Amino acid sequence: MGCEPRSFRNLEVMRTISRAVFGLLLVNIAVFAAGFLLPDWREQIITTGELWFPTNENFALWQVVSYMFLHADFSHIFFNMYALVSFGTVLEREWGAERFLVFYFLCGIGAGLVQLGVNWYEFARLHGHLLAAGMTPDTINAMLASGGEKLPANPALQSVAVDLFRIYLAPTLGASGAIYGLLVAFGFLHPNAKLSLMFIPVPIAAKFFIPGVLLLDLFSGLTGFSLFGAGVAHFAHVGGAVIGFLLMLLWRYRGRVPASITARPAA
């Protein structure tokens, strides 16, 4: 997520990183650095912390939190942390550290659960297809345990099995789900603030920019066509955004956030 506020009512908040955001930034960088400074531990750190499919032997409950602090490469962590600082600092200044952290983690956990739910649905559909083709549950389990060495001979079933493996063996990692929640919260509170993509510096009001990004993610998740490259958990992005939007509605209903705060457009 490489975007930033370009016009905001209180630009003073962007001059220094707020406390909770700084803490999240440090933890993410420390975990990422540990993977390179401790190469013998890298695989264990990744395997233990990523969010695996629930039937995979590597799955653990804590992964719905730990996956948010793991990143695949430098560009992955850079863009996520850039967005965390850009939007998180603004929101923490307005909400305070405690509410900000509650919001951040609820969005991140919700994003992970949404991704798991989508994966579970797709896994069940593919599993049912293999069963209907005559494979037994034990045969399918043995195939999954083999790591791909016992694929069906039928080419059509091989394609289904590969998709099944993709879900079973491809865990989710990254803070993007929580970041999308922050992005929605920022747009909810400051719909007229101007945002721009890092590589497309054309300012667009948040109320147009954010829905556009979300629709693009939803399109990519449904079709498999992604402008961001392969291996992106689009439904985690959408899930984090939905959780963020629902939280904002709930908090506004309870009077915990102003019903309408708008930023002045750029001159």
Image (cartoon, rainbow, N blue to C red):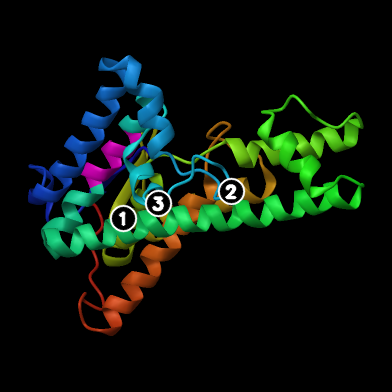
Amino acid type at circle 2 is Thr
Which residue is pictured at 80% across the width and 54% down the height?
128
In space, the residues marked 3 and 1 are separated at their CA atoms by 18 Å
Label located before the other in sequence (2 or 3): 2
Amino acid type at circle 1 is Leu
240 or 197, nearer to the observer: 240
Closer to viewer: mark 1 or mark 2: 2
Establish if 189 lies above or below 161.
below
Query: Contact (CB < 8 A) between labels 1 and 2?
Result: no
**Looking at the figure, which quarter contains the N terminus?**
top left
Q: Which mark is residue 38?
A: none
205 or 249, nearer to the observer: 249
Label located before the other in sequence (1 or 2): 2
How packed mark 1 is, by other alpha carbons closer than 10 Å (few <14, some 14-19, many 20 or more), is: many
Which residue in the protein does label 2 denote?
Answer: 55
Secondary structure, mark 3, is helix
Does residue 170 appear to the left or right of 205 in the view shown?
right
* Whole-percent x, y for residue 231 in the image: 56, 34
Which quarter of the picture shows residue 36?
top left
Which residue in the protein does label 1 denote?
Answer: 182
Query: Contact (CB < 8 A) between labels 2 and 3?
Result: no
Which residue is pictured at 31% across the width and 62% down the height?
185
Secondary structure, mark 2, is loop
Closer to viewer: mark 3 or mark 1: 3
In space, the residues marked 2 and 3 are separated at their CA atoms by 15 Å
Predominant secondary structure, magenta span: helix
Q: Which mark is residue 64?
A: 3
State the extent of the magenta-drawn residues as a range: 79-86
Amino acid type at circle 3 is Val
Q: Taking the image as drawn, is residue 186 in sight?
A: no
